[in-house]
Amino acid sequence: MAAAPALAVTGSTGHLGGMVARLLVEAGSPQRLLVRDAGRAPELEGAVPAVCSYADAVLAKGALEGVKTLFMVSASEAEDRLQQHYSFVDTAMAAGVQHIVYTSFFGAAPDATFTLARDHYATEEWIKASGMDYTFLRNDFYLDFLPLLAGADGVIRGPAGDGVMAAVAREDIARSAVTVLRDPALHVGRTYNLTGPEDLSLATAAALLTAGTGRTISFHNETVEEAYASRASYGAPPWQVDAWVSTYTAIAAGELAGPTSAVHELTGREPLSLAEFLAASHTI
């Protein structure tokens, strides 16, 4: 493992981590792909797969030996996600990792309305306490998710009111991450709030989705009680339903609002708007 690249990327079998891994290849940066199943690792030039699990300290320590910079994509949503993060950060520190670049969430705080943003804040604090160098990429809501919010009837339902959010394309997050990973020393101790170029209400987003997809999309503002009732049929655990509903109440509270210049600062390009994202997408 000593000969493996000193830059490690997690999440390469997923959307964001996969984008980052491919962009690193385009930039000519060798990388180690930390994956649960080596057979699922993308086949990329200069990329070496290593089997790793956030929750398995022995496996993770072996995969992290010799790593200097670690791109840590937050784990899949789970009740024990925070404990997985703590374990992985502890293992990274023990393995000698020098710098963690962590994908956090916009407005991460101990009292954030969006419940999972509290876990992101706790992870940030754990990383800070580890003594390793760090860079936090606090991503706003994904533009990529907006078309998926509408039900089969074309209605987006949630208690977001007239609140707005500065949603950002996953592509812009990936490009920002690659800038940091290629020269991490320039970004030590920095927190970047990654947003799109505009604040969007869900009513405005619905109109843009209608124009951009050819599907008639509308927004229905539920009460919080209606939101919990309408999601009860999914049979999801309470923590998951809380996360779903609080996505909308965080928008209503204004906690996802406020476009920043961070994407342009990191990439030299303006972030995609929803209309631009839809025009460039042929998968919707």
Image: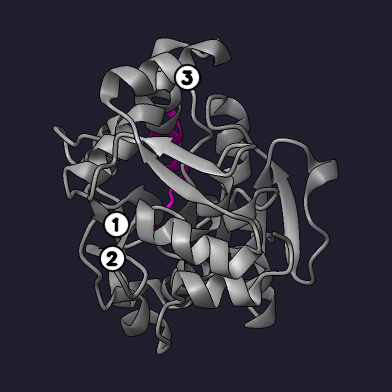
Q: Is residue 227 visible?
A: yes
Task: Give the residue type at disc 1.
Answer: Met
**Considering the numbered disc 2 on the image, is that residue within a helix, a strand or a loop?**
loop
The quadrant in which residue 228 appears is top left
**Residue at 48% across / 55% down in the picture?**
70
Q: How many marks?
A: 3
**Can you tell which mark lies on residue 231?**
3
Q: Quadrant of the C terminus?
A: bottom right
Observer-nearest of 68 and 24: 24
Q: Judge left or right: residue 23 versus residue 114.
A: right
Question: Crowding at label 3, few (<14), some or many (≥20) Cα neighbours within 10 Å?
Answer: few
Q: Give the labeled residue for mark 2.
A: 199
| Residue 165 marker | 1
Rendering coords of residue 57 (x, y %): 53, 27
Q: Position of residue 65 (x, y in %)?
A: 57, 47
Could you say whether the residue bearing mark 1 is in a helix, strand or loop?
strand
How is the protein colored in the picture? one colour
> Label 1 vs label 3: CA separation?
22 Å
- Region of the chain picked out in magenta, as a range: 87-99
Label 2 and label 1: CA atoms lie apart by 5 Å
How crowded is the residue under tag 1: few (<14 C-alpha within 10 Å), some, or many (20+)?
many
Residue at 47 percent across and 19 percent down: it is 231
190, 206: nearer the viewer: 206
Left or right: where does residue 107 sit relative to residue 157?
left
Q: Are marks 2 and 1 in contact (CB under 8 Å)?
A: yes
Residue lying at 39% horizontally and 52% vertically, measured from the top left: 141
